[in-house]
Image (spheres, grey):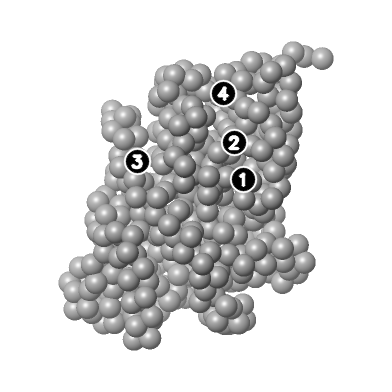
Amino acid sequence: MESPQHAEVVVIGAGIVGLACAWHLQQQGFEVILMDPEPPGSGASSGNAGTLASYAVEPIAQPALWRQAPTLLLSPQSPFHLRWQHLPRLAPWLWRFLKASTPHRAQHTTRVLSELLAPAVDDWQQVLDDLKGNDEGVTLYRRGSLYFYRSAQGWHEAQRDIAARERFGVAQECLDARSVAALEPALEGLAKGGILFTDACHLSDPLTLAQRLAERLVSRGARLVRAKALRLLAQGGGVHIATDRGSWQAERVVIAAGIRSQPLARDGGDRIPLEAERGYHLEFPSARELVSRPCCPVENAFYLTPMTGRLRIAGTVELGHPDDPANSRRLGYIRRHAEALFGPLGEPSQSWLGLRPSLPDSLPVIGPASSLPGVSYAFGHGHLGLTLAATTGRLLANSIKGEAPEWLADCAASRFR
């Protein structure tokens, strides 16, 4: 039998979270192997809305969902879609999700998210500063992010959320219809009101960011290994990694493999209720200058983000099976509602389906495995993977050094026991 290759730290997953973890570990002097069967930035890291949503302190699991559930589940106009044939498999996750939607649980989650999100933009700026000279094709735009509300009822209901974010120090400006149109002329006549999140940013291209970050890591000695991790076990005072292309022996392992993290976490002694929120996007080159910042028609639950050479419209939520084919009706939902707002947008240059790794309480898992020494987790960020990647990398590196803040215990895997 061929002897395993040796490594100090293996980061399993070369998406944006794994790359950010590798960057922080490398900054701490660790020798890093990045292991992924796909190229860096593939999957959800390449197709997100490109927004650093530092304002998103309120969890997806909200008390209002108990009232909204029938409409969300049954209306053909809903931004949420459940593939009913998968309900038996999804039921435990959905039940946990509903339990996390009580007022007490939602308030607790908001406090934790506010801790995670407060430094998110500054943490990313540190990484981007390091990429200077190797950042061709990557621009961070500090123009804020705009929510706008098409109905008077939606604008009225938004006041509770505005007040909640205010309590956590989120920088936000309330705009009337005229101010929304002054900020984004394409929205004239469409909004009853809006919120500008002034500290939010967006990227010119999330995939290019991941690629440049991978290049920087490699230039400093990291190695990219195209392999799929299959099993982890304690061996020889470290962690043995069985892959589809041989085996490795590592002093430490970080599991940051997105939706593929769940079976590996079982080897760490943790049964994590991870599900794939299937998200979609369409890109329209002819509409690339429609808006100048990420804009979200809240009632439709998607983002319009200007990126290099195109407008990306990303969003909606579909629960099903990760291996299901793309749902053309979800793509049709995005196009239909976008063109109802703005008229014909031309032919899309790309359609995309990606798998957001989501946990029912809207918090990621960051920290050590329960029963496999040397293994740590960094996954389950849902809609906030790009936003929280750099912060997660910093917290993960601090956790390995024994310097994690006390509140990070709320993101521990042990909460699901």
The residue drawn where x is 28% and y is 33% is: 129
Which mark, by number, is residue 9?
4
In terms of image quadrants, where is residue 1?
top right
In terms of image quadrants, where is residue 182?
bottom left
Sequence-earlier tag: 1 or 4: 4
The residue identified by callout 3 is 124
The location of residue 64, given as percent across then percent down, is: 51, 76
Eye-nearest disc, 2 or 4: 2
Q: CA distance from mark 2 to mark 4?
A: 14 Å
Eye-nearest disc, 2 or 3: 2
Q: CA distance from mark 1 to mark 4?
A: 20 Å
Left or right: 15, with 24 as reference point: right
Which mark, by number, is residue 413?
1
Q: CA distance from mark 3 to mark 1?
A: 25 Å
Sequence-earlier tag: 2 or 3: 3
Q: Callout 2: helix, strand or loop?
A: strand
Left or right: 177, with 250 as reference point: left
The residue type indicated by label 1 comes to Ala
Where 189 falls versus 225 (above or below)?
A: below
The residue type indicated by label 4 comes to Val
The location of residue 77, given as percent across then percent down, is: 53, 80
Sequence-earlier tag: 3 or 1: 3
Eye-nearest disc, 3 or 1: 1
Sequence-earlier tag: 3 or 4: 4
Question: Do residues under tags 1 and 4 come within 8 Å of each other at their CB atoms?
Answer: no
The location of residue 195, given as percent across then percent down, is: 28, 69
Q: Residues within 10 Å of mark 2 (few under 14, many from 20)?
A: many
